[in-house]
Amino acid sequence: MSDFKTRLLEEKEQLDDKISKLFPFINSDKFTGIDKVQQDLLKLQLPTMRIYSEILQQRINNLN
């Protein structure tokens, strides 16, 4: 496997880990305790991260 593909796989894995932690945080009681602006930004960040993850997956698939 090329170093480039390895880096893409690692990047996607790290991103997916962050996504898996952010989603439950947004639905937790702790989330309601943070600033409203931060809440709104995190709610925008989650779908953006998901799209980014999908793009990384497409790039990985394209290398196969």
Image (cartoon, helix red, strand yellow):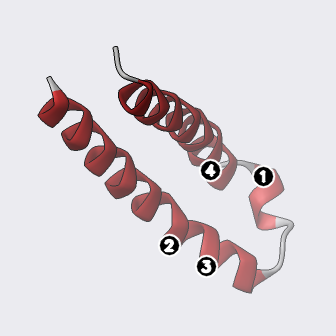
Quarter of the C terminus within the rendering:
top left
Mark 1, other Cα within 10 Å: few <14 / some 14–19 / many ≥20: few
Tag 1 residue? 29
Residue 55 as seen in the image, left or right of residue 21 = left
Contact (CB < 8 A) between labels 3 and 2? yes
Q: Position of residue 45 (x, y in %)?
A: 53, 66
Q: Position of residue 39 (x, y in %)?
A: 68, 73
Say which element carries label 4: loop
Q: Amino acid at mark 1?
A: Asp
Q: Residue 3 occupies which quadrant of the picture?
A: top left
Q: Amino acid at mark 2?
A: Leu
Q: Earlier in the sequence, mark 2 or mark 1?
A: 1
Mark 3, other Cα within 10 Å: few <14 / some 14–19 / many ≥20: few
Tag 2 residue? 44
**Measuring 72% from the left and 85% from the top, which residue is drawn there?**
37
Q: Nearer the viewer, mark 1 or mark 3?
A: 3
Task: Give the distance between the C-alpha atoms of the residues marked 3 and 2, in whole angstroms.
Answer: 6 Å
**Measuring 61% from the left and 79% from the top, which residue is drawn there?**
40
Task: Give the distance between the C-alpha atoms of the residues marked 4 and 1, in whole angstroms.
Answer: 7 Å
Which of the numbered marks, if any, corresponds to residue 27? 4
Q: Position of residue 27 (x, y in %)?
A: 62, 50
In the image, residue 27 sits, relative to residue 6, either above or below, namely below
Task: Give the distance between the C-alpha atoms of the residues marked 1 and 3, in whole angstroms.
Answer: 15 Å
Tag 3 residue? 40
Q: Amino acid at mark 3?
A: Asp
Task: Give the distance between the C-alpha atoms of the residues marked 4 and 3, in whole angstroms.
Answer: 13 Å
